Amino acid sequence: MDEKLLSIDNATNELIKKAQTDGVETIWDRKANMKPCPMGEKGICCRICTMGPCRITPKTPRGLCGATADVIVSRNFARMVAGGAAAHSDHGRDIAHVLHMASKDGNYKVRDEAKLIKLAKRWEITTEGRDIYDVAHEVAEFALNQFGKPFGNLELPPSLPEQRKKVWEDLNIVPRAIDREVVTIMHSTHVGCTADADSMLDISTRTALSDGWGGSYIATELSDILFGTPIPRETEANLGVLEENQVNIVLHGHEPSLSEMIVLAAEDPELVALAKEVGADGINLAGMCCTANEVTMRHGVKIAGNFAQQELAILTGAVEAVIVDVQCIFPALAPLADCYHTKFITTSPKARITGATHLEFDEEKAYDSAKSIVREAILNFKNRDNKKVFIPQTKNHATVGYSVDAIVNQLDTVVNSQIDPTGTVKPLADCITSGVLRGAAGVVGCNNPKVKHDYGHIELIKELIKNDVIVVVTGCSAQACAKAGLLSKDARRLAGKGLATVCELVDIPPVLHMGSCVDISRILELVGEVAKYLNVDIPQLPVVGAAPEWMSEKAVSIGTYVVASGIDTWLGVVPPVTGGPRVLEILTNEMENTLGAKFFVEPDPVKAAGQIIERIEQKRKALEEMFENKEELAKA
Ligand code: NFS
């Protein structure tokens, strides 16, 4: 591989070249010119009050208020967790509001009644003899109350093993209301509050848990109820999915409430006819970032690319509109879109961007609102300048949409030769305990120009599957895999013997697409159910997490709740905590004593894979010994 290339992905490299020819800049140009602040990199710059900003150096070991490096680092870390938890959870809240407005004749409907009823029963909401929408509205209200309930703790899902809950209780980190946890961080990090790294990290952990087992979990469950629980589907990925003769619309952002309506609107006969009228063959939707995951796993909408590729979509010159809602959207898209004919359309009052066309999405009139947005895109087709068009021919085939239900069903079909609606995780647990699969890894997260684009994800995952570790992916890692062909069933040939055999029998790829980043709750559910089935706590399972190219605050919250859930987590990008020795010690060492898992930082994905496999084998050994002892005890 050419070391000078910025990505392992052809389409990306070709379009970076086109950017140079076209004289426009991309994230990689800005990265080349940017000198990251060495203080910020270590987390030792404090901007919490205006006496500073204070920077910790050997000469100035304390801020003006006396805050030490550890205090500053831990507060900065906590605020990242709060930012991430807020973003994920507010997404969950929005979906709950949409469920609350769902109606039989409205734009939003209940698509998975069984899941709704199951959730209603869990929350002790009467279901018998009631209209399904009455139940839905009460479920939505119950969910909304999890954000601000004044007393008590968060309603935790049944997939959480009792042993894990006990660990949190003993550490006093069981999350309370979701908003309350975020606010607690903002309060505790205010000047003159928490000045103790240990306590600050406990507060951070509790907040992160309110995201993973709360806000994100709610986002996933309610999205499934509203838009359907994903089932395996075929799709294609990379910028080669854009079509020369069609109106290309890129859907970018996060919340399916917008993208689902755009998918419907793009099929509206009136709009399809309009597309023909303007000279196009049709309307081609392609997803980007987590919205791509949402719509591909429910509709098979093709994937244009992941986080680092958002500018490149515009650079093809073939995109009529990039429609965004919230999160992970480059402000750079606005000036870039001006260099091409692309309309950059913002839709959320939470994420307005200077220079964009703002067409606010009105959920009350969702379908009409979506139609007028799509119409804008179609009418822009005539402005396309064919001289500027270059669509790379790179794309790959992928199977996506492995919700927990889909995984359980798929395994059941093999074991019981038919789908059992009450299916359990037994077959999966058996594959792991027998050693056919050595373990499982959840590889998630973003792109970060500190890492060669997609290299961190793909190298790590290839090593893992080669060693019989089954991999589940979400977020931009999932798209990296889709583009690299790892989500195709053919990728079995890259797997070790055990994993390849399981894939063959079950008819799955070695890397399973489980959705967007809020859908990491699906991974929690799966792992929790397997632990419960084996009657162990999560840290005892040969299971790990990894975020090889992470960059966002959401990823900090995710990493923290994954570790607090008892899953060791490998980071490929160094977090801004190295300036706080105590913080570093807790995160990469002591958390193992309290929570049963910790963070590992390893920028080299091949080395990280080696460490992961070693760790998995240690866990296997301990698990096997435990089961042997249990058997002996049972015999005695
Ligand atoms: Ni996740 Fe989704 Fe991608 Fe990173 Fe952004 S899209 S929520 S934060 S960049 S994986």
Image: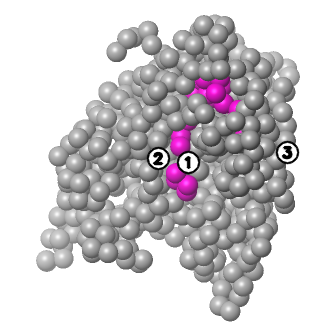
- Which mark, by number, is residue 301? 1
From this viewpoint, which residue is outermost toward the bottom? Answer: 129
Q: Earlier in the sequence, mark 3 or mark 2?
A: 2
Look at mark 2 in the image and give the residue it sits on. 235
Model colouring: one colour
510 shown above or below 155 = above
Residues rendered magenta in the picture? 297-325
Q: Earlier in the sequence, mark 3 or mark 1?
A: 1
Label 1, label 2: how many angstroms apart (C-alpha)?
7 Å
Look at mark 3 in the image and give the residue it sits on. 360
- The mark lying in front, picked from 3 and 1, is 1
Q: Earlier in the sequence, mark 1 or mark 2?
A: 2
Position of residue 155 measured from the top left corner of the image (x, y, whole percent)? 63, 68
Q: Secondary structure at mark 2?
A: strand
**Where on the picture, by quarter, is residue 636?**
bottom left
Label 3, label 2: how many angstroms apart (C-alpha)?
29 Å
Q: Are marks 1 and 2 in contact (CB under 8 Å)?
A: yes
Q: Secondary structure at mark 3?
A: loop
Give the amino acid at mark 2: Thr
